[in-house]
């Protein structure tokens, strides 16, 4: 059976080369006689896998030496609580910027641990833009400033890095990490669920500056203490071993392509192809301000929403799945992560033209 074009927001499409490599190694990883899923996380085979994955991620993002890389579990959602537990460092407040559902959820969770102040919000226009820096009202006494650098549901992406002075900047980069180069040194902490651009669900990446580690609240569970996890090389408990293995294959795939500069070039081409067609007429519409449109998650609506079901049915018949928009916003959403080929986006645009010709 031919593979579909999978536009899911996550778990999302993985590179075919990575899937083929994982398949080849399923029964016997490098002559070990074991599948990676069967390996002890304490054994030399898996420790080698984890060490190489971390090294490749460090090279891809040019992560400075004074940052810890943690391979954790619980998804980005667990980080909504884990971040204030670890980063408040005796302070009572943190600043949050709201640009969609995920940043709202992060702020809501943080309220259980601190005064989660809203420094800026784009809710006044339905979370369709990124608030400009001059509109932010930051607190000098904040422990950190948190924002979601790409909102998966609404398709809003920050194409710039906020300036927060001496206050650590924290980013939920789940749905666009590794899609472009990133200056890690501008951040106190970056976190991302793996199931979009990194690998299978079950793995969460945390990149945290060393000076922010080691002052967790007293009631922080051991498994949620960044320092304890860092000291144990992310193996305080059994890690998501197979997810780390596949993530490592994805990192190698990105390096072989030419790194993040090359994948950014490809992502720009894919996003431009889709947005150019969306902007061409009135049959389809993307609600996001053009300067803040996501390259990864492209929501769009039809002029007549009663045609949504027919559109989705026709797309599936043509080998395209998971185009239904999130229930909170409706319409459609095409997630075009790193592993989505340009041919997949072209196939979608061709179908959109065909559908518009019939119903426009």
Image (spheres, rainbow, N blue to C red):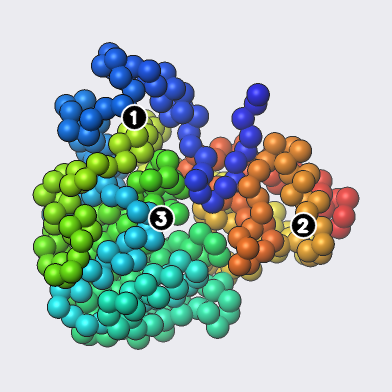
Write down the residue under mark 3. Answer: 174
Give the quadrant of the C terminus.
bottom right
Q: Residue at x 21, y 45 (%)?
A: 237
User: On the rendered structure, is 160 left or right of 312?
Assistant: left
Q: State which tag comes first along the sequence, 3 or 1.
A: 1
Point out residue 75 in the picture as x, y percentages from the top left corner: 37, 54
- Determine whether the residue tagged by mark 1 lies in a helix, strand or loop: helix
Mark 2 Cα within 10 Å, few/some/many (few <14, many 20+)? some
Point out residue 182 in the picture as x, y percentages from the top left corner: 33, 54
Above or below for 331 versus 256: below
Q: Which of the 4 quarters of the picture holds residue 113? A: bottom left
Task: Looking at the picture, tell me which residue is in the foreground, 242 or 281.
Answer: 242
Task: Looking at the picture, tell me which residue is in the foreground, 277 or 11.
Answer: 11
Above or below for 22 versus 195: above
Q: Residue at x 63, y 47 (%)?
A: 322
Q: Residue at x 18, y 80 (%)?
A: 91
- Determine whether the residue tagged by mark 2 lies in a helix, strand or loop: helix
| Tag 3 and tag 1, C-beta contact below 8 Å | no
What residue occupies the far right of the structure in this picture?
358
| Tag 3 and tag 2, C-beta contact below 8 Å | no
Mark 1 Cα within 10 Å, few/some/many (few <14, many 20+)? some
């Amino acid at each position: 059976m031919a593979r579909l074009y999978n536009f899911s927001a996550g778990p999302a499409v993985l590179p075919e080369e990575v899937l083929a490599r994982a398949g080849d190694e399923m029964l016997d990883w490098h002559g070990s006689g074991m599948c990676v899923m069967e390996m002890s996380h304490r054994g030399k085979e898996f420790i080698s896998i984890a060490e190489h994955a971390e090294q490749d991620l460090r090279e891809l993002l040019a992560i400075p030496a004074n940052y810890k890389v943690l391979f954790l579990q619980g998804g980005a959602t667990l980080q909504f609580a884990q971040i204030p537990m670890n980063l408040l460092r005796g302070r009572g407040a943190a600043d949050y910027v709201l640009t969609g559902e995920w940043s709202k959820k992060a702020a809501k969770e943080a309220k259980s641990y601190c005064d989660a102040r809203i420094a800026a919000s784009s809710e006044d226009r339905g979370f369709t833009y990124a608030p400009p820096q001059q509109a932010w009202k930051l607190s000098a006494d904040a422990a950190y400033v948190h924002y979601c650098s790409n909102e998966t549901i609404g398709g809003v992406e920050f194409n710039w890095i906020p300036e927060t002075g001496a206050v650590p900047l924290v980013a939920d980069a789940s749905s666009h990490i590794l899609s472009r180069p990133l200056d890690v040194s501008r951040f106190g902490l970056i976190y991302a669920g793996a199931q979009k651009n990194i690998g299978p669900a079950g793995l969460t990446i945390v990149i945290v500056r060393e000076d922010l580690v080691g002052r967790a609240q007293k009631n922080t569970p051991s498994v949620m203490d960044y320092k304890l996890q860092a000291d144990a090389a992310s193996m305080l408990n059994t890690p998501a071993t197979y997810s780390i293995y596949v993530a490592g294959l994805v990192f190698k795939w990105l390096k072989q392509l030419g790194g993040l500069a090359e994948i950014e070039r490809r992502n720009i081409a894919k996003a431009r192809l889709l947005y150019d067609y969306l902007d061409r007429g009135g049959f389809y519409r993307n609600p996001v301000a053009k300067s803040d449109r996501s390259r990864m998650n492209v929501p769009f609506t039809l002029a007549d929403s009663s045609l949504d079901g027919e559109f989705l049915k026709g797309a599936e018949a043509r080998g395209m799945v998971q185009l239904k928009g999130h229930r909170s916003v409706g319409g459609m959403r095409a997630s075009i992560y790193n592993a989505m080929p340009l041919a997949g986006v072209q196939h979608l645009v061709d179908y959109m033209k065909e559908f518009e010709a019939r119903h426009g």
